[in-house]
Amino acid sequence: MNVLSLFNGMNTGRQALENVGVKVNKYYSSEIKPYAIELTQHHFPDTIQVGDVTKWKEWDIDWKNIDLVLSGSPCQDLSAAGKRAGINGSRSSLFFVFVDILEHIKKLNPKVLFLQENVGSANKLDVGIMSRALGVYPCRINSSLVTAQLRDRYYWSNIKTSQTMFDFVTDIPQPKDRGIMLKDIITSGNVEINKHTCLNTGSGETENAKQEYLLHRNSTTGMITLIQEEEKVRTVNKIEMCRLQGFPDNYCDILTTAKAGSLLGDGWTLPIIEHIFSFL
């Protein structure tokens, strides 16, 4: 397949294709974050970097031979954790750039496949707008089925669809529950909850001065998961963050914990994407 990955991040789409045995001919990546590009080229040096998604009309791509378009357009304006600016917010409105690119390719290759992902906490109105723009409604899968984290996401795709009376729907079934709990993936310490609640840019072992802040944030927002280490608490370390997204322990070894956390926190859950690509 010839693949165009928009908002490529840490290249989960390419890794998933490799893992399910789909042969990749050319893989074009649109990404501007330097350490995301660094990690991508480390694992897949043949990746063709094309740059800023908003400058797509300048890209030197054989558009008619693109078989699959991947998009994880920014969720910050859609997520319940954000300010809820919606699909027309400054970042999440980049979704429409993906739509423009997809429509351009469809004119040259009507059979092109696509996958678009975004947060499960998106407003129903925004989900409807995105669905009508793509001509298909999404399926909804929580990464808790295949990893030790709660990560509710919508997935729009024409890889496998069914038709209701009026609409096309993404017909990807739920993956089998693997029963992985947070206690199963931590490298040390103890936890009181079964699933990690929000994968953030954790900085590994915390300093004493941060203990009160971490405990306060955990109790007031619930948006941070703490691991008890004797008399201290900490957030997830780099190995644990990789495991939460279904990656090998050493996948982000070339990056600092903060940079790895940034990419993993914004990225796709590898086993979920493998599951979707198993229907290619």
Image: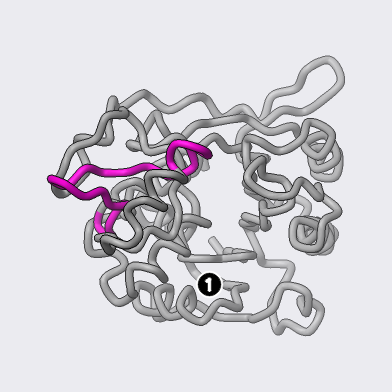
At numbered mark 1, what does the secondary structure look like: helix, strand or loop? strand
Closer to the camera in the image, 1 or 254: 254
Q: Position of residue 263 (x, y in %)?
A: 46, 63
Q: Position of residue 275 (x, y in %)?
A: 44, 38
Closer to the camera in the image, 94 or 108: 94
Instruction: Tell me the kind of residue under disc 1.
Output: Lys
The answer to if 229 sits in the magenta stretch is yes
Is 44 placed above or below 87 here? Answer: below
Is 165 placed above or below 172 here? Answer: above
- Counting every numbered tag in the picture gives 1
User: Which residue occupies 45% across, 34% down?
Assistant: 150
The answer to if 89 sits in the magenta stretch is no
User: Which residue occupies 63% across, 45% down?
Assistant: 81
Residue occupied by mark 1:
26
Q: Position of residue 194 (x, y in %)?
A: 31, 28
Q: Position of residue 257 (x, y in %)?
A: 33, 68
User: Which residue occupies 51% across, 82% down?
Assistant: 34
Residue 68 visible in rendering: no
Q: In this view, does 192 lie to the left or right of 112?
A: left
How crowded pointer 1 is (Cα within 10 Å; few <14, some 14-19, many 20+) is rated as: some
User: Which residue occupies 54% across, 34% down?
Assistant: 152
Is 88 placed above or below 176 here? Answer: below
Q: In this view, does 171 lie to the left or right of 46?
A: right
Closer to the camera in the image, 249 or 105: 249
Residue 81 visible in rendering: yes
Magenta segment: 218-239
Please identify the quarter of the rendering in which residue 205 is found: bottom left
Q: Is residue 169 left or right of residue 90?
A: left
How is the model colour-coded?
A: one colour
Closer to the camera in the image, 127 or 191: 191
